[in-house]
Amino acid sequence: MTESDENKVISEFRSSRDARLFDRLYRSHNQSLYAIAIRITGDPVMAGDAVHDTWLRCIDRIEKFEGRSSFRTWATGILINCIREIWRRERNDLYLSDIQPEFNGMPALPHGIDPLDLEVAIASLPPGFREVLILHDVEGFSHEEIGGMLGVVAGTSKSQLARARQRMRDQLTGHSRVNDER
Protein backbone atom coordinates (compact mmCIF):
# COMPACT_ATOMS: atom_id res chain seq x y z
CA MET A 1 0.00 0.00 0.00
CA THR A 2 1.45 3.39 -0.94
CA GLU A 3 1.76 6.13 1.66
CA SER A 4 -1.01 8.18 0.02
CA ASP A 5 -3.31 5.11 -0.03
CA GLU A 6 -2.40 4.50 3.58
CA ASN A 7 -3.22 8.08 4.57
CA LYS A 8 -6.58 7.75 2.80
CA VAL A 9 -7.32 4.52 4.67
CA ILE A 10 -6.38 6.18 7.97
CA SER A 11 -8.59 9.17 7.25
CA GLU A 12 -11.53 6.96 6.32
CA PHE A 13 -10.97 4.75 9.35
CA ARG A 14 -10.98 7.78 11.65
CA SER A 15 -14.42 8.77 10.45
CA SER A 16 -16.06 5.37 9.99
CA ARG A 17 -14.19 2.98 12.33
CA ASP A 18 -14.80 0.37 9.65
CA ALA A 19 -13.03 -2.87 10.64
CA ARG A 20 -12.16 -3.60 6.99
CA LEU A 21 -10.11 -0.40 6.83
CA PHE A 22 -8.30 -1.28 10.03
CA ASP A 23 -7.65 -4.74 8.62
CA ARG A 24 -5.83 -3.18 5.65
CA LEU A 25 -3.48 -1.31 7.99
CA TYR A 26 -3.04 -4.39 10.12
CA ARG A 27 -2.17 -6.62 7.16
CA SER A 28 0.28 -4.03 5.83
CA HIS A 29 2.25 -3.63 9.05
CA ASN A 30 1.68 -6.50 11.48
CA GLN A 31 4.41 -8.77 10.16
CA SER A 32 6.98 -5.96 10.23
CA LEU A 33 6.01 -4.94 13.77
CA TYR A 34 6.27 -8.52 14.97
CA ALA A 35 9.69 -8.95 13.34
CA ILE A 36 10.97 -5.84 15.11
CA ALA A 37 9.48 -6.98 18.43
CA ILE A 38 11.00 -10.46 18.20
CA ARG A 39 14.40 -9.03 17.33
CA ILE A 40 14.33 -6.66 20.28
CA THR A 41 12.84 -8.98 22.89
CA GLY A 42 14.02 -12.38 21.68
CA ASP A 43 10.81 -13.78 23.14
CA PRO A 44 7.93 -14.77 20.82
CA VAL A 45 5.32 -14.47 23.57
CA MET A 46 6.53 -11.06 24.73
CA ALA A 47 6.78 -9.92 21.11
CA GLY A 48 3.21 -11.04 20.44
CA ASP A 49 1.96 -9.25 23.55
CA ALA A 50 3.79 -6.06 22.59
CA VAL A 51 2.40 -6.12 19.04
CA HIS A 52 -1.11 -6.75 20.38
CA ASP A 53 -0.79 -3.81 22.78
CA THR A 54 0.60 -1.70 19.93
CA TRP A 55 -2.44 -2.30 17.75
CA LEU A 56 -4.81 -1.49 20.60
CA ARG A 57 -2.99 1.80 21.14
CA CYS A 58 -2.92 2.54 17.42
CA ILE A 59 -6.70 2.23 17.32
CA ASP A 60 -7.12 4.37 20.43
CA ARG A 61 -4.65 7.02 19.27
CA ILE A 62 -5.28 7.08 15.52
CA GLU A 63 -6.72 10.58 15.90
CA LYS A 64 -3.30 11.73 17.11
CA PHE A 65 -1.49 10.42 14.05
CA GLU A 66 -0.52 13.62 12.23
CA GLY A 67 1.26 12.12 9.26
CA ARG A 68 4.58 13.82 10.07
CA SER A 69 6.14 10.38 9.74
CA SER A 70 4.96 7.22 8.03
CA PHE A 71 2.37 5.11 9.82
CA ARG A 72 5.03 2.37 10.12
CA THR A 73 7.38 4.73 11.94
CA TRP A 74 4.59 5.98 14.22
CA ALA A 75 3.44 2.43 15.03
CA THR A 76 7.03 1.27 15.63
CA GLY A 77 7.47 4.07 18.18
CA ILE A 78 4.37 2.82 19.98
CA LEU A 79 5.75 -0.73 19.78
CA ILE A 80 9.04 0.30 21.40
CA ASN A 81 7.12 1.92 24.26
CA CYS A 82 4.95 -1.19 24.68
CA ILE A 83 8.05 -3.40 24.87
CA ARG A 84 9.58 -1.14 27.49
CA GLU A 85 6.37 -1.17 29.52
CA ILE A 86 6.22 -4.97 29.42
CA TRP A 87 9.81 -5.13 30.65
CA ARG A 88 9.00 -2.74 33.48
CA ARG A 89 5.73 -4.48 34.31
CA GLU A 90 7.43 -7.85 34.58
CA ARG A 91 10.34 -6.29 36.47
CA ASN A 92 12.56 -8.06 34.02
CA ASP A 93 16.13 -6.81 34.14
CA LEU A 94 16.77 -8.63 30.87
CA TYR A 95 19.11 -11.39 31.79
CA LEU A 96 20.80 -11.13 28.43
CA SER A 97 22.26 -14.61 28.43
CA ASP A 98 18.70 -15.97 28.20
CA ILE A 99 17.76 -13.94 25.12
CA GLN A 100 18.09 -15.59 21.74
CA PRO A 101 16.67 -13.29 19.04
CA GLU A 102 15.89 -14.55 15.56
CA PHE A 103 17.40 -12.69 12.63
CA ASN A 104 15.75 -14.09 9.54
CA GLY A 105 16.46 -11.21 7.18
CA MET A 106 20.09 -10.53 8.02
CA PRO A 107 22.46 -9.79 5.15
CA ALA A 108 25.33 -12.17 4.43
CA LEU A 109 27.93 -12.17 7.17
CA PRO A 110 31.60 -11.43 6.56
CA HIS A 111 33.73 -14.53 6.12
CA GLY A 112 34.56 -16.21 9.40
CA ILE A 113 31.65 -14.84 11.47
CA ASP A 114 29.30 -17.48 12.78
CA PRO A 115 25.59 -16.45 12.74
CA LEU A 116 25.21 -17.79 16.28
CA ASP A 117 28.10 -15.61 17.48
CA LEU A 118 26.37 -12.63 15.86
CA GLU A 119 23.08 -13.40 17.61
CA VAL A 120 24.86 -13.75 20.96
CA ALA A 121 26.69 -10.46 20.38
CA ILE A 122 23.45 -8.64 19.57
CA ALA A 123 21.63 -10.20 22.53
CA SER A 124 24.43 -9.12 24.86
CA LEU A 125 24.09 -5.46 23.92
CA PRO A 126 22.42 -3.20 26.48
CA PRO A 127 18.76 -2.62 25.53
CA GLY A 128 19.29 0.94 24.23
CA PHE A 129 22.15 -0.10 21.97
CA ARG A 130 20.24 -3.18 20.77
CA GLU A 131 17.12 -1.14 19.93
CA VAL A 132 19.03 1.40 17.85
CA LEU A 133 21.12 -1.28 16.09
CA ILE A 134 18.04 -3.29 15.13
CA LEU A 135 15.96 -0.28 14.13
CA HIS A 136 18.75 1.21 11.99
CA ASP A 137 20.82 -1.66 10.61
CA VAL A 138 18.15 -4.34 10.37
CA GLU A 139 14.91 -2.40 9.84
CA GLY A 140 16.38 0.54 7.94
CA PHE A 141 14.92 3.43 9.93
CA SER A 142 16.75 6.76 9.77
CA HIS A 143 18.32 8.33 12.84
CA GLU A 144 15.62 11.00 12.79
CA GLU A 145 12.88 8.34 12.80
CA ILE A 146 14.62 6.39 15.56
CA GLY A 147 15.01 9.57 17.58
CA GLY A 148 11.28 10.19 17.29
CA MET A 149 10.46 6.63 18.32
CA LEU A 150 12.78 6.60 21.30
CA GLY A 151 12.33 10.21 22.38
CA VAL A 152 15.96 11.18 21.75
CA VAL A 153 17.72 13.45 19.29
CA ALA A 154 19.14 11.97 16.09
CA GLY A 155 22.68 12.51 17.40
CA THR A 156 21.96 10.24 20.36
CA SER A 157 20.75 7.56 17.97
CA LYS A 158 23.95 7.94 15.94
CA SER A 159 26.20 7.67 18.98
CA GLN A 160 24.25 4.67 20.36
CA LEU A 161 24.63 2.97 16.98
CA ALA A 162 28.36 3.67 16.84
CA ARG A 163 28.82 2.26 20.34
CA ALA A 164 26.65 -0.76 19.55
CA ARG A 165 28.67 -1.50 16.43
CA GLN A 166 31.94 -1.12 18.36
CA ARG A 167 30.67 -3.50 21.04
CA MET A 168 29.71 -5.98 18.35
CA ARG A 169 33.16 -5.74 16.72
CA ASP A 170 34.87 -6.12 20.09
CA GLN A 171 32.82 -9.17 21.00
CA LEU A 172 33.16 -10.81 17.61
CA THR A 173 36.94 -10.26 17.56
CA GLY A 174 37.46 -11.30 21.18
CA HIS A 175 38.12 -7.85 22.65
CA SER A 176 36.17 -6.60 25.62
CA ARG A 177 35.14 -3.20 26.87
CA VAL A 178 33.46 -2.53 30.16
CA ASN A 179 32.42 1.12 29.79
CA ASP A 180 29.43 2.63 27.96
CA GLU A 181 26.82 0.54 29.77
CA ARG A 182 23.35 1.63 28.63
Image (cartoon, rainbow, N blue to C red):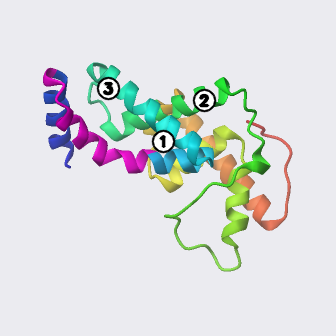
Q: Residue furthest bottom?
A: 111
Q: Is residue 54 visible?
A: yes
Asked if 181 appears above or below 120 in the picture, the reply is above
Q: Residue at x 78, y 39 (%)?
A: 180
Residue type pointed to by label 3 = Ile
Q: Which badge, 2 or 3, comes first in the chain's sequence?
A: 3
What is the secondary structure assignment of the residue under circle 3? helix
Residue 34 horizontal/vertical position (percent) = 46, 47
To which quarter of the image does residue 173 belong? bottom right
Residue under circle 2?
Answer: 86
Residue 21 horizontal/vertical position (percent) = 18, 36
Q: Which mark is residue 143?
A: 1
* Alpha carbon separation for disc pair 2 and 3: 19 Å
* Mark nearer the viewer, 1 or 3: 3
Q: Nearer the viewer, residue 15 or 138?
A: 15
Q: Is the C-beta separation of discs 2 and 3 under 8 Å?
A: no
Residue under circle 3?
Answer: 59
Q: Residue at x 13, y 24 (%)?
A: 16
What is the secondary structure assignment of the residue under circle 2? helix
Tell me if mark 1 has few (under 14), some (14-19) or many (20+) residues whose alpha carbon lies within 10 angstroms of its own: many
Left or right, residue 13 beside residue 106? left
* Alpha carbon separation for disc pair 1 and 3: 26 Å
Q: Is the C-beta separation of discs 2 and 1 under 8 Å?
A: no
Residue type pointed to by label 2 = Ile
